[in-house]
Each structure stands twice: as C-alpha cells, then as structure tokens.
Image: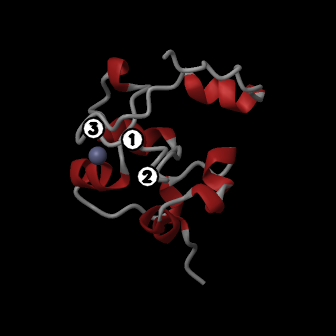
Amino acid sequence: MRSVIPPPRSTTPYQNYMKGVQFDCVDCGHHTQLMGEYYTLVKSVWWEAVDKRPDMHTVMLCIGCLEERLGRRLTPGDFDPTLWVNRRPEEHSLRLKDRLRRAK
Ligand SMILES: [Zn+2]
C-alpha cells in the first residue's frame, strides 16, 4: 500500500527564507538553528573567527565552536544589536541567552 502524500503546508516568507539557509556548524556539524544558536555578530568579531576568509562569510558556527576559535567567551558587545535574530530570546539556547545577557 502506498502512503498518502500530505498536501504541502502553506509557508510564511520567514519559513521559506529559513529553508534555503545552511545551518550546520562548519566545525562540529550540529544544526545551529535547532540548537537555538542562530545569531549575528558584529563584523569585526566574525572576521576574526573565520580568519578573514571571504568563503567563510556566510557559514554558521555554534557558540561553542565560535568561542573555541576566538579563544574567549562572547560578550553582549560581540552581537550586532540591529539584527532581529539577536532579539528572539524564545529561540535562543541557554548559552546564547547567557552571552547576550547584558551586565547590569
Ligand atoms: Zn559547532
């Protein structure tokens, strides 16, 4: 017996955008979005992490691998405050929330 193929679900522009994105961390292979580690850093910090390689500009790194590359912990100032991905705490992992938390 053949299984019934479900009708395509309607997708929002956001979901369509997300489908085209390669989320795997280039160092450990974990899916950064499923881990809750989809974020954007200020350009200078990102460039430092990827050794200024243009072909690495659009790749993903999870927080652990990124900090390994930088040799230090991320701080709130490392994240680009203008970008919406950094302002979705409901989608952030505990360690991303921790790094984004501003010192009071
Ligand atoms: Zn990783």
Q: Badge 3 is on which residue? A: 29
Residue 5, quarter of picture: top right
Q: State the CA–CA distance, disc 3 to disc 1.
A: 6 Å
Amino acid at pointer 1: His
Graded by Cα atoms within 10 Å as few (under 14), some (14 to 19) or many (20 or more), the crowding at tag 3 reads: few
Secondary structure category for the residue under label 3:
loop
Q: Is residue 40 left or right of residue 51?
A: right
Tags 3 and 2 touching, CB below 8 Å: no
Q: Is residue 68 left or right of residue 98?
A: left
Going from N to C along the chain, the mark reached first, 3 or 2, is 3
Tags 3 and 1 touching, CB below 8 Å: no
Q: Nearer the viewer, residue 50 or 12?
A: 12
Q: Residue at x 26, y 32 (%)?
A: 51
Q: Residue at x 53, y 65 (%)?
A: 100
Q: Which mark is residue 31?
A: 1
Percent position of residue 36, x then y: 49, 53
Percent position of residue 16, x then y: 67, 24
Graded by Cα atoms within 10 Å as few (under 14), some (14 to 19) or many (20 or more), the crowding at tag 1 reads: some
Amino acid at pointer 3: Gly
Please, is residue 85 above or below residue 15 in the view? Answer: below
Q: Badge 2 is on which residue? A: 35
Amino acid at pointer 2: Met
